Image (cartoon, rainbow, N blue to C red):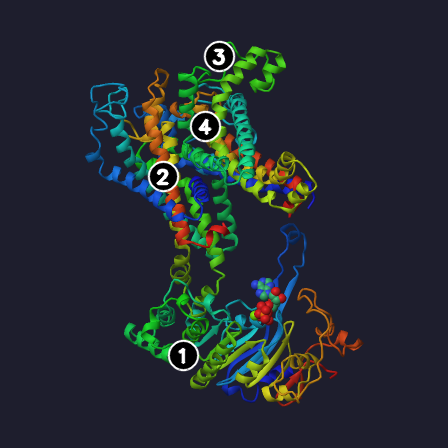
Amino acid sequence: MISEKLGKNIKQLIGDSSGVMFLIGLFLLVIFIIMAVFAPYIAPYSPIKPTGAQLLPPQVGHIMGTDNLGYDVFSRVIYGSRMAFSIAFIATIIAAAIGIPTGLIVGYVGGKLDSVVTMIMDSIYTFPGLILAIAIAAMLGQGLINISLSIAVVYIPTYYRVIRSQVATIKSELYVEGAKAIGAKPKTILSKYILPNVLPSTIVVLSMNIADAIMTEAGLSFLGLGIAPPTPDWGYDLSKGQQFILQNDWWLVVFPGLAIILIVLGFSMFSEGLNEYLNPNIGEKR
Amino acid sequence: MKLKTYILTRILLSIPMILIILTIVFFVLRVLPGNPVLAMLGPKAPPEVIHAMEHQMGLDKPIIIQYFVYLSHIAVGNFGISTYTSLPVLQELLQKFPATFELTLYAMIVAVFIGIFMGTYAAYNFGKPVDIFARVYSIFVYSFPVFWFGIMLQLIFGVWLHWLPVSGRSAPFMIPDHIYTGIYTIDSLLNGEFEVFIDTVRHLILPSVTLGIVISSIFVRMVRSNVLLSLSSQYVTAARARGATEKKVLFKHALKNAMPPILTIMGLQFALLLAGAILTETTFSWPGIGNYLITRISYRDFPAIQGAIVFFAFFVSIISILVDIINAWIDPRIRY
Amino acid sequence: MLITEKLGVGCMADNVVVVKNLKKYFPLKLPWLEAFLKKEKPMVKAVDDLSFSIKKGEALGLVGESGSGKTTVGRSIIRLIEPTDGKIEIGKKNIINLTENELRKERRNFQIIFQDPMASLNPYMTIGKSVIHPLEIHNIGTPKERKERVLEIFEKVNLIPAKEFFNRYPKQLSGGQRQRVVIARAIITNPKFIVSDEATAMLDVSVRSQVLQLMLEIKKEYDLAFLFITHDLASAKYICENIAVMYLGKIVEIAPTKELFENPHHPYTQILMSSIPVPDPNFKKKKIIPKGEIPSPTNMPTGCRFRTRCPYAKKECEDVDMSLQMINERHFSACPFF
Ligand SMILES: Nc1ncnc2c1ncn2[C@@H]1O[C@H](COP(=O)(O)OP(=O)(O)OP(=O)(O)O)[C@@H](O)[C@H]1O
Ligand SMILES: [Mg+2]
């Protein structure tokens, strides 16, 4: 996963002070969350109403300039965070809602079921995620839910693999055998003895996954497979802005790109710090 | 296990994986809510026309029969006929493939080159500014969306400096006379067309550097930590003690020990490279399979879309088999 | 077969646990290609034809070197792992025939205490919840009664003040306290039979004797049948009425504790006895050293399994079977020559 490697890098850079990393990540996230929640109050213009002045470079009144339709780029960047968050959250929740139970059950049952499901999940996992998402998005068409679904499919195996491998080790722990010995049903064992023990690492995967989903979403909408225009979306704005770079209208592409980079960095640092905090020993094992 | 046995098992093991991807692609494209015929003809098409089209495409048969027909077609290399150009999809794909291959090949070379040099120097100057630069580099570069980075390079080197062309694979009339491999850098040299070669390279630089730099982050990190490890190993200490020059110690001994993991990473990053290639091709209008896929999506050319994805599946499988075999050949322990 | 009958016969009435011809074979893991080609799958005979019985209020010690199959016996008789073959009765109930569901219900009657108390407790459950859980599973009492019962048991196992301990997590306890929690969990459903698999092996020496004392107390108080697995003969002597000595999946000698210590018959038992430190220096035993390593259970010697290491081994040992021979009414040994 992009964010996992990123976080590891950053941690290496600032040494043992993973608390600092967590805080920087948190700071970036809080800024983006505030942007998304209070977009109407922060943005100076409506993101989907032309302001009348087309292709203006950054200046007072339009600090990030305007695009070819006269939309205010700064306002679109602010509102774009909404799209990034919504799709990333929905996709992550769908992927987790399918991947986690599957990993739990298959990891616990083991045997033939395990071999078959794991082979399927591994095949999806090794296949380039963006290409799979493109295929599904191409079929489903544009729209918030459709894009989220296409992205979710890509990340189901991530959850499955993390959960399954943990369950496979945890199920041979003595306390699971102890639960069997007191007559607990498999359902109880899974929910009370195994799930709480895999949850901390799941939370980390969830938060890393959001960064990846944002990246994939940006890619899909750059390719024109995202949300229908004129809804503000960083990836889409980038691809539209690219048409004007030959005229040197750099502000159309620089700012949405920076937003993507900062939000991805934020989530990566945040989740790596979280990982350090929740699973102090897991880092080395992975 | 003998190498031959290993190769055989590895190939056999990849068959289920390819089958699974084929199955997923099939069901994604056939079972998901969208109806390909409706999508192609538009919602206002008269029912007779829709039925005729469905019949022609075999869509009126039970889904399971369609599935096996599809598998048997793929097995004999029949990827269907494009509804946009009416050409066999496989023929189109094979014609586009060398462009994608050339792009990914040079991107990989760029990535490995940066990885080895930056990683080695960072490790050698552990904790010094070079090292810190390398680490900041690999953090930032990895968070770049590849298309955004591509556009930035276009802006800087194409628009501001006018050094390099910003899109396409070659200037008009700058295509090699005879196509042997489809890889223009090789074909132009084989033809002795030096100008064409220069033009090809100029077009190739921005896309392959874009993709290469984004991928290079992992290599830098990998090489750096491996070289750090082997620099502290007895082997290197011994070489130093024998009086080997520092340069020799670094490149001959430390780096040599760090090489095998690089190969594994190359294999692992391949999926990422291909995904990146699609975005890069779109950014630079590079006429490869990624660009083909995206264009055909906008034309709703379903046989082409399906074909391109199946083609990617085979490509990924073949590369991962190759990487595994090379690894097993270098390091016999892997075979067990 | 005659001997095994005798082990249980006579006082059948108060036998809580009867195990007959218990076998547990583990298939050996092979690389898949080899596994595919080989017709006969090689097996690890971890437990090979074992019979014994335990009376109400009595403890049977199961001693033997590491790898002799003690844990496998303990786990198979309560079907935490499925036995390959054999008959098991606990409290007159045939355990082997039970379906999964019936077995789960029956589990309130027999419990197991493992070696590692930290690993036996769910780190994300307070110890109160851990101990109350068996009552919830078996639907015993109202929630209020359950909690009262847990507090009562906590006091019994000396986790005082019980109310405070109730809400603690395992990592906030010492090793001895954790094992007390595990014991509390084991006895909370009033079982008839408890397996203790080296329950004190990981504890500090000082704590060990306290926990042993506690086990002795609960055994008396609840009239429990105990299977006390250990490789420490001294603690077996402290707790157990009878002791069975295991070697490579077989019982080589079984006898009342006193009898076994005074008159060990099987050469292997003698070796085990000679290797425990004797407190009384005047009572020095002749030290007999076993030769070599314990053989791998996949490649067992023919005849007597102990002959490769037995100081008295002779030619005939290659074809004896290891059935138990009667020494007296309650003492049996698997060596026909000694
Ligand atoms: N799940 C298993 N799969 C395969 N072999 C096993 C399994 N469990 C135990 N064995 C084998 O069965 C034999 C007996 O093991 P067991 O754990 O019962 O011995 P033990 O007497 O309890 O030893 P220790 O004193 O070390 O606990 C060993 O050779 C072991 O390798
Ligand atoms: Mg054991």
Tell me, for residue C157, which label it has, or none: 1
Q: Are marks 2 and 1 on the same chain?
A: no
- Residue beneath disc 4: B278
Q: CA distance from mark 2 to mark 3?
A: 40 Å
Q: CA distance from mark 3 to mark 4?
A: 21 Å
User: What chain does badge 1 belong to?
Assistant: C
Residue type beneath disc 2: Leu
User: What chain does badge 3 belong to?
Assistant: B
Q: Quadrant of residue C53?
A: bottom right
User: What chain does badge 4 belong to?
Assistant: B
Q: Position of residue C282 (x, y in %)?
A: 66, 89
- Residue beneath disc 2: A149
Residue at (40% x, 24% y) in the render: B152
Q: Quadrant of residue C181?
A: bottom left
- Residue beneath disc 3: B171
Ligand 1 sits in quadrant:
bottom right
Q: Secondary structure at mark 1?
A: loop
Q: CA distance from mark 1 to mark 4?
A: 67 Å
User: Closer to the observer: label 4 or label 2?
Assistant: 4
Q: Position of residue B223 (x, y in %)?
A: 55, 38
Q: CA distance from mark 2 to mark 1?
A: 55 Å
User: Closer to the observer: label 3 or label 4?
Assistant: 3
Q: Are marks 4 and 2 on the same chain?
A: no
Q: Secondary structure at mark 4?
A: helix
Mark 4 crowdedness (10 Å alpha carbons): few <14, some 14-19, many ≥20: many
Q: Are marks 1 and 3 on the same chain?
A: no
Report if the CB atoms under discs 2 and 3 are less than 8 Å apart: no
Residue at (32% x, 72% y) in the render: C164
Query: Considering depth in this image, is A233 or C72 the residue closer to the camera?
Result: A233
Residue type beneath disc 4: Ile
Q: CA distance from mark 4 to mark 2?
A: 20 Å
Residue type beneath disc 3: Ala
